[in-house]
Every structure is written in structure tokens, then in C-alpha cells.
Image (tube, rainbow, N blue to C red):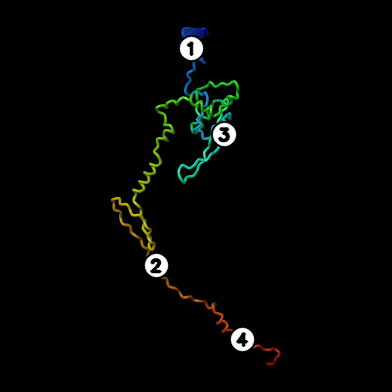
Amino acid sequence: MADGILPGLVKGMATTARSLTRRAHTAEYPDVSPALPSRSRGVIALTEENCTSCMLCARECPDWCIYIDSHKEEVPPTTPGGRARQRNVLDRFAIDFSLCMYCGICIEVCPFDALHWSPEFEYAELDIRDLLHEKDRLGAWMATVPPPVALDPGSAEPAEVAAAAKPARAAGAAAGAGAAAARPARVRPARAGTPAPATAPEVSTGTPEPPTETLAAPPVAETKRLPVVREPSEQTSEQTSEQTQVLPTTDPREPE
């Protein structure tokens, strides 16, 4: 047992001896600001122009410390004959940091990058009610948001960069229209007895096409009308009246 305690005691005394020879490092805060990493969770900053009042951050917040008020206004059409649209206008965006637990869910779910982390943490207040930051104060924190760190060499390209690198739709539509115009027009053979519809002239492609044969329907022979044969029971009323006989009436009381 003594063999196990003695080496450990010697190692501990050696560590203490090395620390005695080193100069102590003291963080002289608040005179010297600490060097914080760029992803430090200090305070949440707001970019008001990116917010669309979609309420995703307020619904996903587990502490319900985000308050949003907005109204809708009509936007005139950008082209003549177009339809007017409506958009949400942000009236109020507030975060109560006395309730916030700095989980970062609101920043992750925002689809338009309206919320950002700032490493600034010096916003303590004597009154807890002053920890409710409105949109003006949240927007002022954007000056302290550091630029994003560079991506790793083997990481995937961000979705925003990939979307911006795609060609415009107008160029793709023009290319599709040119390809459709270069195709030769197809002509269907007309049926017998039906006038052929007017078709556009064919575009010559340099390769002769085989002639198309028109299939004509065979002529139908004229049918003859058969005579109508009546049965003996089907007689007219005149023939029936001629065949009937009228019997004389006799009185049974008269002698024959």
C-alpha cells in the first residue's frame, strides 16, 4: 500500500513545484475585456429588415420570452396589370432576457437569418424589467456580431451560395423556346372524307422523309329493302266485317 501512495505523493509535489516557478495569469476584468470565441452566446441581435413576422421563433421558444406584433399592408403591383400583394410589417419584436435560457432555438429555426448570436454579455441591469429588450435595442447589438467563421475545406456549399450561382430563369426559358423552334413540325395523315386542317409549313432539316400513305376506307355496298310479309291474323277491319254473316231474328212463340 505504501508503494502506491509514495509515487503519487511525489508526483503531486512535483506539480506544485512547477507551478510555483510560473507567473500567475490573472484575468484583469473589467479593465481588460476577455477574448471570447466568435460563437459565444452572449446576447441575441436582430436584423429587422430580414424579419417577416412568421412567428416561428416565438412558437418554438420553450420559455415564451419572445413577443412579436405585426400588421399587413398592401403592396402595389410592380408591373402594369399585375395584382397587388400583401406583406407583414413588423411593429414590435422584444425578447425578455430575464426568462431566456440561451438555448439558441430561435436562431436555428429562423428561415431568413434575422437573429444572430453576439458575444456581448455586459448588459446587466439593476431592475429586472429593463432586461426586456425591444427591437431598437436588439438591432443595436448587430454591431457587435462577428463575421461567420470560414467553412472547412471539405464542407458542403451553403444553400444560399448554391441558389445564387444558378442561372436565371429567363435564360433557361429562352433556350427551351429555341430548342422547340428548331424541331420539325409533325403532320398527321388525314382520314378519308375529312378535310385536312391547316398546318404550319414544315421546317426542312436536310434529310428527306418517306412519303406517308393515306388509307382509304372500303366502299359499303347498298342494302336492299326487304318486302314486309304479314301474318294471316293481321287483317284489316274491312276484311273482317265482310266475312261476318247477319242471322235473322225469330220469335220462339211463333209456329214454324
Asked if 165 appears above or below 242 in the picture, the reply is: above
Q: Earlier in the sequence, mark 3 or mark 2?
A: 3
Kind of residue sitting beneath label 2: Val
Give the residue at mark 4: 246
Asked if 117 appears above or below 86 in the picture, the reply is: above
Residue at image x 50%, y 24%?
118
Instruction: Indicate left or right for 175 with 23 as reference.
Output: left
Task: Residue 18: give x, y in percent of width and height.
Answer: 47, 8
Kind of residue sitting beneath label 4: Val
Query: Which numbered mark, 4 or 2, is in the foreground of this view?
Result: 2
**Local secondary structure at mark 3:** strand
Give the residue at mark 2: 220
The Cα atoms of the two marked residues, 4 and 2, are separated by 58 Å
Give the residue at mark 3: 69
Q: Are marks 3 and 4 in contact (CB under 8 Å)?
A: no
Task: Residue 177: give x, y in percent of width and height.
Answer: 37, 46
